Amino acid sequence: MFYETLKLAVQAIKRNALRSFLTLLGIVIGVSAVIAMVTIGNGTTEKVKVEMAKLGSNLLFIRPGQWGPGRSSATARPFSMRDIAELRSQLRGARAVAPMAQQSVTVVYGSESRSVGTIGTDANYVITQDWGFAEGRNFLDGDLRSGRAVCIIGATVHDKLFGSAEAVGKRIRVSNVSCEVIGILERKGESGFGTDRDDVVLMPIRTYQRRIAGNTDINTINVSALDGVDTQKVQADIELLLRERRGIIAGEEDDFRVADMKQIADTRTATTSILTALLGAVAGVSLLVRGIGIMNIMLVSVTERTREIGIRLAIGAQESQVLMQFLVEAVVLSLFGGAVGVLLGLALAGAASAGMDIPYVLDPAIVVIAFGFSAVIGVVFGYFPARRAAQLNPIDALRHE
């Protein structure tokens, strides 16, 4: 019985090929949009997690000044090496504390030159950043105490200035300072903020302050917490210590800010997850609209086939059989459209992931939900036209022109 009903439904779909195709197209677009958008959103979220992890989930940044209207870091007192020393001696739970003073300067080697972010720091910087060396070595105590003109370069600087040539042991000019390259950092790629982390030159903090900056200011302090230590506890200790050192009394606002990379990463991940959910919801609404389109098409089909329905009822067909025929037609269209939509959605998500350079993160649940939703749409929106066809009066149906 069901086989005959299915056969009649397929025959009816073939007789109206163009109309059936347009109905299928609506389901295909809706299902593929849901899968593609959610998969792309998941990939974007995963990329944010990976990129933020490169900065270290246990990393804290300390900068002078506060964010917000009417506030300026330009007027806030910068940090000093005394602050670094106090943090290192008194801060519990910290793996490393590194000073940072930075600005963009021109770096030259031979006939090649480029503007590069140059950082004055010490050997603890690569520890706080979980950064290894592709070649060469880190700063030694002697380099830092004597203020030697040495530097460590990132992979991008190496590629642009030296190409495939050896760099360690060569001298480059950083602004007006001739520096010996003692190390090349491992490649890290773009940060979670879209900047090239490898386009950097590191110099001993004293060399940088005396010969590049012309002052002893430190505008950023990096603090890396030990594994298993709560960064919020470390942050609270930092704030307490710096308030004391900077003479901030109770009730006064801090003139510095401490940013927890874990909190920043969680915020960005939550934001991308919300956007993914919104994209999925928009695509789901479009799929619902396609379901209404199925109902409209089936209602037109019932009107066009009124005499056929009347004949079937007149020769003994039961209402349940007529209802089942039209319902099966709607479900077949929805299921076939859903299957094609799943394949198209996966293909689109794969192409988008490759083009946008994001991970392909497929959530099997969204595939099942999208396909199941297309089937439910076929049942729900196909039921009303099918019920209308089954309840037609045979005599009125036979009189229909």
Image (tube, rainbow, N blue to C red):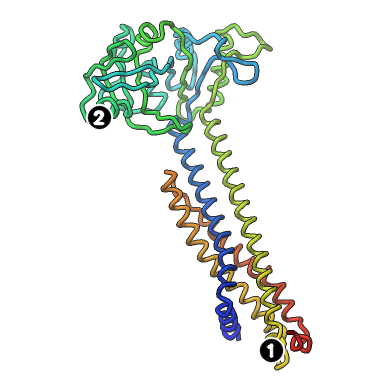
- Determine which residue is flagged by label 2: 163
Quadrant housing the N terminus? bottom right
**Nearest the eye: 274 or 36:** 36
Residue 160 picture quarter: top left
Distance Cα–Cα, label 1 vs label 2 = 81 Å
Residue at 63% of width from left, 21% of height from top? 68
Residue 134 picture quarter: top left
Residue at 48% of width from left, 60% of height from top? 344
- Determine which residue is flagged by label 1: 312
**Left or right position of 202 against 36:** left
User: Tag 1: residue type?
Assistant: Arg
Position in image of residue 14 (x %, y %): 55, 79
Position in image of residue 69 (x %, y %): 65, 19
Q: Would you place residue 45 above or below residue 110 in this image?
A: below
User: What SS does tag 1 mark?
Assistant: helix
**Left or right position of 382 against 183:** right
User: Tag 2: residue type?
Assistant: Gly
**Nearest the eye: 139 or 166:** 166
Q: Would you place residue 135 above or below residue 108 in this image?
A: below
Q: Would you place residue 191 above or below residue 244 in this image?
A: below
Position in image of residue 136 (x %, y %): 25, 23
